Amino acid sequence: MRTTMRHTALWLAAVAVAATGSLSVTAAQAAAPPATTVAAGIVVPGYSPTAPYTPRTGVIINDPQIRDRQRVIMNHIVNLYDSAPPNSRIRMSDWNIAYSPFVSTAIAAHRRGVSVQIMMSAGVAARQDPRTGDYATLKRGLEQDGRNASRPAALRSFIRTCVDACRGAGGINHAKFLTVSQTGGTVASPTPAPPVPAPTGTPTPAPAPTPVPTSPTARNIVMISSANVTKVAMFNQWNDAFTLVGDAKVYGFYERTFGEMVAGTRGNYSTSTSANFPWLLAAWFNPFRDRPDPIMVMLNKVRCTGAVGAGSRGRTVVRLAHTVLTGDRGMTVAKKVKSLNRAGCITKVVFTLMDRKIRNMLYSTTGTRVPIRQLVRDRDRDGFYDLYLHTKTLTISGNWGGDRGAHVVRTGSENISAKSAVSDETGFDVKHVGYETLYSRWIDSVFAKGTTSYTPRAPSDARVGADPWRDVQLD
């Protein structure tokens, strides 16, 4: 039963483009969300070559308030690791790793012959216990068990860190992505073992039977996310993950950029289009030093009236569900949203942390007031916030870029802050009715959970002098 549940993770309202890359979307499909994994994915520990997990292109969004939806992103990650066959490759970047079942899964993949390479933030690793922390455990398990000796240098497993951004000075490694070369099937060994001669005077043993090759369930898998590999990401935060399956061009872009991160090669804003999915406008990486802010570039293409087949009653709708809007960058983006609201767009902003002056500007009746909601709660009323938004998503429905019926999404790891401009960040820009509809409906749902009051202070029952934000992980 557990195996069946694992492989029949519920996919809602499947849109043809989500599974096949086709742009033929019917009216009924356009009104429904695309293929989306929800909570039925039960992790079956260990590698099963005869019953591997089958990932699909689509979106996963967790819900920390619903037990069956808390682990859906983490289950997806663990299932991908568990289904990678020997001699396949996994590459991963995350700001924080603090979840022991994942650590065990990653080490198990390495031990069965998967090349597992992980990049993490040095600051976070340094705060973990140097002997028992997850970084230290992964370091031992991936690098110090002797299995790397027989592998080509490029395929040796490891976990490493970057002090600043991996691809530049300043910032942090905040990119959250995972690539898997293949799930299921078999992969030829890059270094076949030489034949062992039989001892003198003994019969030559019969050769071992050659394994029958089996077909993979998926190749060239890329997942981007707002989630870290932590318990907090499951039980305290709303997060999303977007997976592409079967696109060698995007997969190669992520593998090359991962190589730059490992080498410490200085980079700037870089993008890739898709070979298989025309609706993927761009897969992208920060930093974007000395270049226009990509979020502003996207917002500057908005026209607030003249929407046809999108938006609401001829007006374009702009929604933001972002963890952080701070500093000059946050103010610039917020002022643009305010100007769009004044020009006739319907706007909506839900956030976790926002500078007071940004909040006051958006909520001011000067011009027009932008509807905003803060989503941060003290669920157990101990004086510390423990339930909050962690996504970094923008949706546009309406007149955009000369298309009066556009449906656009930008999502990934990037907060709207000065630090994210010089940090390793990644995400997808998508133009697709199903994905925009899914994300916009979800933003509406979390917007409804937020409050109009701005509450940087501790709840009334907090201890004197306690910081209510103590346990909130904004990165």
Image: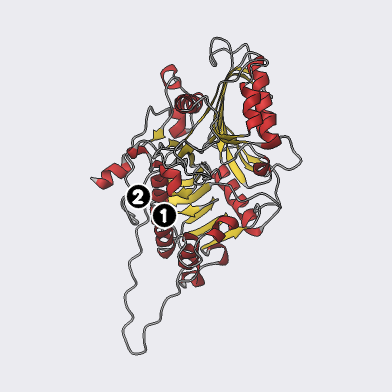
Q: Residues within 10 Å of mark 2 (few under 14, many from 20)?
A: many
Q: Using the numbered discs, state the Cα–Cα distance from disc 1 to disc 2 in whole angstroms.
A: 17 Å
Can residue 402 be spotted in the picture?
no
Give the percent coordinates (x, y) of residue 471.
49, 46
* Closer-to-camera residue (458/373): 458
Q: Is residue 452 above or below residue 198?
A: above
Q: How is the image coloured?
A: secondary structure
Disc 1 versus disc 2: nearer the observer: 1
Q: Is residue 255 above or below residue 375?
A: below
Q: In the visual, does 81 lie left or right of 334?
A: left
Residue at the right extreme of this rendering: 290
What residue is pinned by disc 2?
52
Residue at the top extreme of this rendering: 313
Residue located at (57% from left, 63% from top) = 154
Residue located at (47% from left, 73% from top) = 146
* Closer-to-camera residue (311/128): 128
Q: Quadrant of the C terminus?
A: top right
Give the percent coordinates (x, y) of residue 99.
43, 54
Residue located at (45% from left, 32% from top) = 18
What residue is pinned by disc 1?
102
What kind of residue is marked 1?
Phe
* Closer-to-camera residue (414/212): 414
Q: Counting residues from the N terminus, which is met first, the one under dot 1 or under dot 2?
A: 2
